[in-house]
Image: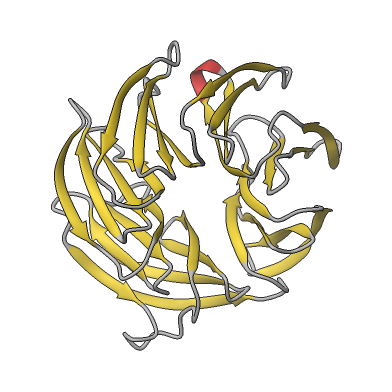
Amino acid sequence: MTAEKIAELTGHSNPIFTLELSQKPGILFTGGNDKGIVEWSLKDNTFIKVMFPVKASVYAIHGPVGYPLLFTGLRSGQVLVFDFIQQQITKSLNHHLKPIFDIKTVNHKKELLIASEDGTVSVWSLDDLAIIHSIKVSADTIRCIAISPDEKQVAFGCRDNTIQIYDLEDYTLIKSLHGHTMSVFSLAYSPDGTYLISGGRDAQLKIWDTAGYQLIKNIPAHLFAVNHILFHPTQPYFATASMDKSIKIWSSEDFKLYKIISREKGYASHPLSINKLAWTGNHLLSVSDDKNIMIWDIKF
C-alpha cells in the first residue's frame, strides 16, 4: 500500500474540526474554529467561497443524501440549516443549549439525529424540520453517532466511557457497552454490519461483534485519542485519525495495520492533531488543528 500527498488546501485561519463531502460530487465543506463554513472544489483543489458566517465553533457538518440541505452544528448548541436551492440559511434548530458534536441521518425514517454535550440526542423530521423526540442517553456529553448499515440500530459514544446501543425503530436502549477507560470519540459499523469499531480518548480501538455486542478485539492503535474511524466505501480497509498526528490504515478483515501516514514516517503530514477524515474514491482527505486540509492518494 502506498500513500502520496497530492494536494494541501490552505485558507482557514484556525483549527479545522470537521469536514463533509457535498451531495454534489467534487465539493467539500469544512468548518472549525473559524468564522464560517468553507466550500472547496475537489476537481481542481481550490477554494470556492465562504458559504455563510457562524458565530461559534463548528464541530459537525452533515449533508443528508437526497435533500438540498446542509446542517451545521455549533458550539452554542444551535444547528444552522442551509438550503442549497435558496442559497441561504433558512432555519436554525434551537433545541440544544450546549455544543453539538455529531449529526446523522436515518434514511428510511427520514429522520435527523443530533448529539449534544447535554447528554441528549434530538430526533427531527427531515420533511418539515420539526422535532419528534429527545432521548436522554447519558448524564454527560455524547460525542459521536454511528448507524448500522441496515438502519436497525444506532450507537452513541459518550464521554462517560460507554457506548449506548439503541433500537432505531422505537429508540429503546438495547445495551450499554463498557470497555474504554476514557471518552468514546468515534464509532463506525463495518459495511457488512457484523461488527462495530469504537475509538477513544484512551487511544484504543475496540471491535464489538454486533450479534450480541461482545468485545472481540482490542487494539492499542495510537499514542493519543482516536478522533475518527472511517471505512473505505468499497475496499476492505478503514482509516483512523488521531491526536497523535498520524493517520493509520487497517484491514477491515483481519485488523492488520497496513500504513502509517505521519511525519515520523517521512510524510509531509499534519504537525498537529488530525480531527476528521473523508474518502472520495481512493483519495483520503484529512483536516487538522494545523488549519490545513490534505488530500492523500492511497494505492491499495
View extreme (front): residue: 139
- Left or right: 7, with 244 as reference point: right
Residue 1 visible in the picture: no
Q: Residue at x 25, y 63 (%)?
A: 221
Q: Residue at x 34, y 59 (%)?
A: 239
Quadrant containing the C terminus is: bottom left
View extreme (top): residue: 170
Q: Residue at x 67, y 76 (%)?
A: 10
- Left or right: 53, with 79 as reference point: right
Residue 243's spot in the image, x, y percent?
A: 43, 68
- Would you place residue 231 above or below residue 221 in this image? above
Colour mapping? secondary structure
Residue 70 quadrant: top right
Residue 35 visible in the picture: yes
Residue 1 quadrant: bottom left
Residue 268's spot in the image, x, y percent?
A: 45, 85
85 or 111: nearer the viewer:
111
- Count the marks: 0
Q: Residue at x 68, y 33 (%)?
A: 96
Residue 44 quadrant: bottom right
- Left or right: 127, with 105 as reference point: right
Residue 178's spot in the image, x, y percent?
A: 26, 38
- Would you place residue 9 above or below residue 107 in this image? below
138 or 276: nearer the viewer:
138
41 or 254: nearer the viewer:
254
